[in-house]
Amino acid sequence: MSVGYALDLLGSSFAHPIRAVNDMPPDQLVDRLDRLPWDTHAWSAGAWIDTWATAAHWNRMLGEPGAPGSLEALFGWLHTRVDQWTGTWGAPSPTAGRLQVVNGYYRLTRGSFAQFGLPVPHPERLIDTVLDHARDSRYFASGRQNACNVLDVAHPLWLARAQTPHRTADVQAWAATQLEHALGQWQDGAGYGFAATPGGAKSGVTPLGIAASECAATGDRIPGLQGT
């Protein structure tokens, strides 16, 4: 994924299609989707779809449409498996809440619906679900945020709001709060750390250790590319 986007920014592309995706028939794809760990690791499941769909996207840019019916099978599977009450895939955890579900949603839809320019299902329900997660103080109280968790709320809200004005004031209020906090974390010439620091970028207070989702390896507070 990273190499593909880097080449794209440089005005180039892969020289050859990604065969592991291009040659995958619909039945094999559906079998793989069924076996992803939706109930326990929704982020990992979403990341797999992100990877597959992104490879399919690069292949199509090379004029390789893939096995007949595979892309249709992906979006058909997603539409028929989405929870109509939450607009998401996967199950919340009694210990981590909706962290895996929402962060997995970002990965899944980023590579599929957003990248292919398709509307997401049940956008109003999705906004309700994501805003409920965004009130979880374990991940969004001042000083407990990280770039991954904030992005994984901001992107679904942005994506859904392209389809509906549902709860506009609530979405804007959450975004304004997070933006105000983020701007206080900026360090000139260095950028942002991956994890927030209570009291702003220059505070020496060590924040509580709150586990991030699987989309990041560490809670690094040193400014760098990942956080920025």
Image (cartoon, helix red, strand yellow):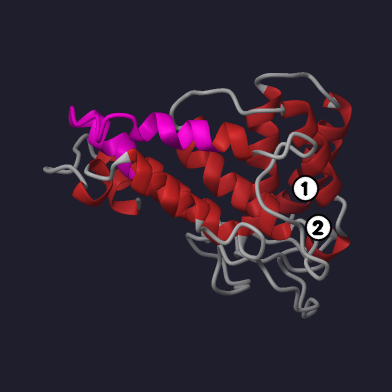
For residue 187, say whether it is visible: no
Q: Check disc 2 and give the amino acid type.
A: Phe
| Residue shown at the point (47%, 60%) measured from the top left | 225
Residue 182 locus on image (x, y percent): 71, 52
Q: Is residue 122 above or below residue 1?
A: above
Residue 158 locus on image (x, y percent): 66, 31
Residue 197 locus on image (x, y percent): 74, 68
SS at badge 1 = helix
Q: Is residue 63 magenta?
A: yes
Residue 10 locus on image (x, y percent): 24, 40
For residue 193, say whether it is visible: yes
Q: Which mark is residue 16?
A: none
Label 1 packing within 10 angstroms: few (<14), some (14-19), many (20+): some
SS at badge 2 = helix
Q: Is residue 187 magenta?
A: no
In the image shown, does 134 or 78 lie closer to the viewer?
Answer: 78
Q: Main secondary structure of the magenta part?
A: helix
| Residue shown at the point (50%, 31%) measured from the top left | 76
Q: Which residues are magenta?
A: 55-77
Q: Is residue 106 left or right of residue 117?
A: right
Label 2 sits on residue:
140
Q: Is residue 220 above or below residue 122?
A: below
In the image shown, does 16 or 93 lie closer to the viewer?
Answer: 93
Q: Quadrant of residue 9?
A: top left
Mark closest to the chain's N terminus, 2 or 1: 2
Q: Which mark is residue 178?
A: 1
C-beta proximity under 8 Å, tags 2 and 1: yes
